[in-house]
Image (cartoon, helix red, strand yellow):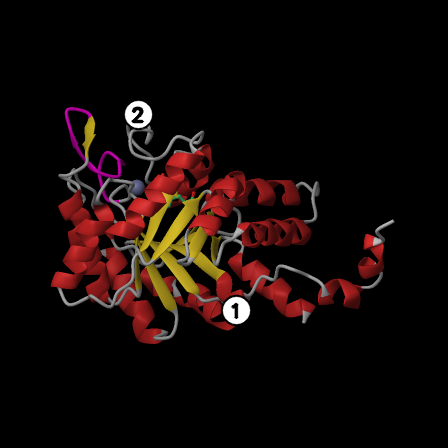
Amino acid sequence: MNRFRRLRASGALRRMVQETHINKSDLIYPIFVAEGKNIKKPVDSMPVVYQYSVDTLDEVLGEIAESGISGLLIFGIPAHKDEFASSAYDDNGVTQQAIRYIKDKYPDMIVIADVCLCEYTSHGHCGVICDGKILNDETLPLLAKMSVSLAKSGADIIAPSDMMDGRVAAIRKALDENGFSGTPILSYSAKFASGYYSPFRDAAESSPAFGDRKTYQMDCANGREALREIADDIEEGADMVMVKPALAYLDVLKAARERFDLPIAAYNVSGEYSMVKAAAQNGWIDEKRIVMENLTAIKRAGADIIITYHALDAAKWLEEEK
Ligand code: PBG
Ligand code: ZN
């Protein structure tokens, strides 16, 4: 008989043979920065998540710096939205201002800039629209302009999340031509059209005004296609790739890990966070156990980097365990 229980007999033994470890440096915390002053607005569907204005960011930046996690993913919420998302590539836009502020105060904090038009368009779609259709090739130059503007502001990593075809190549070319050949791209390569994003759309005020995102984001049924998306982004020049959401797509993450050698990020998205928070607030689950189990599963499946709204809590819990 195999006695597996021999190595489970004490905490010290279990720690010694533990296969998967979460490091604080694996974690990235998403933040929402709104245009205006003196804002700290709770997001109703995401407990303990807030929209900040640049002048109130210090509190959360301090926590991030203290926590030992690698950095943050920034989403801007502009005051002005229009058809062509002009605030997205305005060098004085809210996201650009916030990045300059953060990098000035915390030069060592990794700032990943999400690149997508949906927070900046009046219609809430991730691309330019004509006759109710989301246009692919007409969107690419805007994404490229936005990326250059964010890199100019000091973003360390450019992270396109729009799911237009060919955007990684377009962004790479624009970055290179504008003196940012050293700025890496983390592509949201396998981004599924998911119901798990709805709390985020509250937080980022980016719900589409009509229709859905199924003509550009992936069908949740397609695992093989996800690998083709990833392979294509690598060919176009992505330095890192992403699978999103994380928990319902661990099979995709695992398959990507087996096939590709570059760093892989997983996005533990808003809906995944809010479900855990809601159950914890009801006393139905032990929040710490569930969060650490979820993050461990994401790491075990093959993620190098985990983007998660639990990052600051997880960092605290990892510190306590030492
Ligand atoms: C923008 C974007 C979205 C998320 C990250 N970037 C929303 C969407 O595609 O609708 C989702 C993140 C989350 O749910 O936490 N395109
Ligand atoms: Zn978008």
Magenta: predominant secondary structure element? loop
Query: Picture quarter containing residue 106?
Result: bottom left
For the point 81% across and 53% down, the residue is 4
Dot 2, crowdedness within 10 Å: few (<14), some or many (≥20)? Answer: few
Task: Tell which of 145 and 179 is nearer to you.
Answer: 179
Q: Position of residue 202 (x, y in %)?
A: 40, 40
Residue extent of the magenta highlight: 120-132
Taking the image as shown, residue 308 lies to the left or right of residue 231, namely right
User: Is residue 200 positioned above or below 289 on the image?
Assistant: above
Rendering coords of residue 293 (x, y %): 64, 51
In the rendered image, which residue does mark 2 sit on?
211
On screen, 167 above or below 318? above
The reply to whether callout 1 and callout 2 are in contact (CB within 8 Å) is: no
Residue 67: give its label.
1
Q: Relative to 34, is 169 on the left or the right?
A: left
- Please report the residue visible at 78 percent of the width from the left and 66 percent of the height from the top: 13
Q: Is residue 91 visible?
A: no
